[in-house]
Image: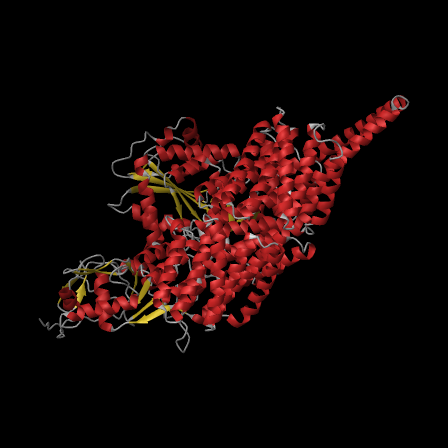
Amino acid sequence: MRLYLRPFRRGCDRRPLRKVDVTRRGAVFYDSEGLPVKVRRFQFGDWQVDAQACVLWREDEGTQVQVEPRALDVLVALCLNAGKILSAEDLLHLCWDGVAVGENQAQKAVAQLRRALGDSVNAPRYIENLRKRGYRTIAPVIFAPHRESDTLAETWARESPYVGLAPFGAGHASVFFGRDVAVVRLRDVLASQLPGGRVFVLILGASGSGKTSLVQAGLLPALMRAGATPHVMDATVLDLGAIGAMPLLTALGSALLDLDEDGEPLFAGRSAEQLGQSLVEDGQGANDGTAPADGRFVLFVDRLEALFSSAFASGLQRQQFLAALDRLARGGQVMVIAACRNDFYPDVVGEPLLMEAKAAGGHFDLMPPSRAEIGQMIRLPAEIAGLSFGGDTDGRERLDDLLCEAAAHSPDALPLLQYTLQQLYLLRSPTRELTLAAYRDLGGIEGAIGRRAETTLEGLSAGAQAALPRIFSLIVALSAIDDAVRGVLARWSDLRSDDERALVQALVDERLFVSRVSGGEAVFGVAHEALLRQWPRAVSWIAEHRQALRVRSQLEGLARQWAAEGRRSDRLLRRGKPLEEARDLLSEGIVPVGPDVNALVTASARHVKRAERLRLGALAAFAAIALVAAFLGLRAGRAEKVAALRLQEAEDLADYMLDELADKLRPLGRLDLLDGVAQKALGYLTTDDPGRIPSAARLRQAKALQTLADVDRSRGNVDAALKALGQAESLLQANLKEGDVDPETLKISGTVAFWFGQIAIDQGRLDEGLRRYTQYRDFAQRRMQLQPNEPDAWIELSYALSSLGGIQLRKGDGSAATANLNASISLKRRALTIHPENTALQAELANSLSWLALTEAEQGQLETAINLYDQQREVLDNVKRQDPDAALWSFRLAAANRLKSSVLLALGKTKSALISLGQAEKQINDSLNKEPENRRWQATRIEIGLLKARADLMLGKVQSVLPDILDIEVVIDQMLRANPADDWEQRHKAQSLLLHGIALTELNDLDAAKQKIDEAARIAQKVADRDGQDRLRAILLANILLAAAEIDLKQGAGAGAKQTCQGAIDALRSIVPSSSDFRVLDPWVRANRCGGDQGVANASAQILDSIGYRDIEYLQNLRK
């Protein structure tokens, strides 16, 4: 059959489209309303389609494919009927109108599209072939919305479709793009809560990720449309970051009073304070649990993190507020949606009412937008507003493409992008073009906000410019919990001069600050916290005064508690550093404080002065009594007392050497001094027959032996360490069998169990490590039962839980690891409120944050892992500042930067990873300069070098990286000669050989490469055979086999390559099920693609894509 139909021509104008049903009339497409459809650009899966230029491209990879016009016509027809089946005859009718063709032309066009899209007939991801029926799209299709009337066009022709630093509101719903998938997913999460009777959803995302906009401009407008499920009649917003000192329950009541039903208040007849209080006292405000027939209401609680960081939110207020939200969520009328920064997740974990939502599937993680979604955010609002994007004269650079690229690499992508677009709109040309010249004048995305702030400042008087530091002191705060910088609102009445008022007004006029009324007072603050991170003046001021901000934050919390408890004297600041810092803060006057803080510091200073006078008087009295007693007893039993005194002094000295002195030497890395201390103490303590010495002496011997074991393990003398630990364990068991167990014995018993476990893990015996770490936790819990109010007991239990979580993570039990690590972090934070200057505790908090970050990374939460690693680094930086000479902290910082770099590589941020690795190299070298024999630190330097070599290989630096790999191999060989059984160094050897082989493969020296890879495989197989449960070794073996398969392919041995890839599949098979760990899924995808199972590979590739995995080596493999 031949058809003679007129051709379909694609539209050439810039009118945006919505997703429509298409029918055929004559020679053009029409939608369901009879309007002609003209297509310019749309999104198909992860591809962008330019229907005019006949081009498909992926913004995340930079891939661009040219398609024949007729094949593009077929794609447009299929996408305009997304999800519907079009037969070959339908496609001929739509796309070859007026041209005589054979029936197979449609099949040929679809085949060409599949090749361009990288699709497969057997495992389709884009276009599905239904036998004897036709074709349909299975990937999502997103068109720009149809301009249904001139009203929308006229609105956005007068206003900017971009919001700057403000969040999108309901009025911006028509220009809110790029979050379609997130809106649908969030709506599904909300709907899933309805059957359980408690509708509470917590949105977690990074600062600036668009949580507020997603709800206000995406979710709520969608739910308020007729026919939506669930349907929402009205919504109200409570921004906890803007309520200032207003009581939480009053603020909640005030927000609820804004809800209307058919024009009448939903909660009538009560004040805001009465309504909020009723939700706690009797629950009447929550209604009866029955949902209204025609819809529900929504309370959106924005910036929930203020519950944990605000100086005005006490623990009791927080509990009451969360209980009120819980009542509302269960009441049937009001659905509660809250948004919280994900760096406050450890605080969320400590609140059972918030974690109850997680158990019910009510936590929603908002991920950063993809490049394709960023492209929609930039281009589609412009199309609606009739704006265009300029480019350079030769057409090589387009402004919209540059914006996409810059936003994809910015940590504050969304607020900075919107601010830049808003500024470009204000600088648009008379023809409504956003110009490339204006973009460059602004300084790009990252420079726009800072440059605008600088320009505004420079246009003011010298007096107004000089007022900036004080303005910063009013609007910048530091969280007392995690040191995070945040913006706060300040009162206009706090401004002292006309210069200060002129400065703030100018920043408000430029929309860098916002001004509003809160609690009946006019207040101001930053429009978005990105300003504090991107304006160099703000960054510099915060860095200079971070300690003052930290002290103020701590004092505000203490002052609030002091005032709430009736200004009790036991809540005053104690003498020493806390009081001195507080007095310095007040005397310097850099950051202002409230009257409660002033009163607290003044009262504390008076109390300390009075106590000091009493102490001196008591000392004088005791001195007099002691002199009299000494004189009277001088002649009676002088020799006996001297002997007893000498014995006590010796025992006290031993205690000091084994406790305080050893603890001070450990961070310094002075293994020689630690060894000497332990040997001297042990020499004294073992002079008596062990069978006749008391339990206290046995405990001291055990401490000395445990210290020796620590030194021996650090020097690689594992046998000596195990012998010392065995002797210590025997002594401690003798004490435990005697009946009454003291806390110190339990503490040392736990420490010994920990070192047994650590050595077992070093040797690859994970089951034994898990058993010993469980013992450690049990000892710590027993001690906690004896000393429930002792912070040192909390700390020890937190160490045990962190260790246990680490080994559980190694064995693949992510949920148990997360629970133990979060519990450990909570205990450490609790102890730090009592001992804020405890550097060892801060370092262990950093260690727990690191393990939790690793757990999140293995569960696919890569951005969350980066945030946790940044928190860890901030904690360690603080510790390092307090104790700059301790080599241990440099080592910990190096390890933190190495771990963060591995996640940055997974996100495709290779250059950022190399910067972090450069910092790690410097830090580990600083540590080894002070303690060159520490094998653990030597091993960490090797791991940093190996990761840096892999990153350089990704960037194609093959020739320059080979000498580095050879240097690493020399160091590994030296360490293996000293300890051939070192399991970790065997693993490092295999890794270095793998990288060496990959580099030689890139240079096409295949015989030498195969020799290196084969040697690596032998070592990895030997290590894996010793402990088949270790996931890391399975991953290493799989990667080595994949490198071997690559060599086989280059040598033309396709069958051998497929067999080798099957070996990689077998190595990973037991650890892949339900895994989101990119380290597992990356080689699994590559192995299955090589082994021929494309369906399995595609399924896992989709998981990697969903978590944002963009490793360069992996993406290059997918393109082959």
Q: Position of residue 957 (x, y in %)?
A: 51, 70
Q: Name the foreground residue: 832 vs 991.
A: 991
Q: Can residue 95 be seen in this view?
A: no
Q: Is residue 760 left or right of residue 618?
A: left
Depth check: 280 or 89 in front? 89
Q: How many marks?
A: 0
265 displayed left or right of 902: left
Q: Quadrant of residue 960?
A: bottom right
- Give the side of residue 741 with respect to residue 900, left or right: right
What residue is shown at x 38% (from left), y 60% (from top)? 1061
Please say which color scheme the image uses: secondary structure
Measuring from the top left, give residue 913's x and y in whole percent.
52, 60
* Place of residue 14 in the rendered image (x, y in percent of width and height, measured from the top left): 29, 67
Instruction: Return the residue nearer the eye: 522 or 646.
Output: 646
Q: In this view, does 605 lie to the left or right of 426?
A: right
Residue 505 is situated, as x and y percent measured from the top left of the image, at 52, 54
Outermost residue to the left? 1
Q: In which quarter of the image is residue 63?
A: bottom left
**Quarter holding the N terminus?**
bottom left
Q: Which residue is drawn at 35% across and 33% down?
A: 330
Which quadrant, please, contains the C terminus?
A: bottom left
- Answer above or below: position of 875 versus 924: above
Q: Is residue 981 visible?
A: yes
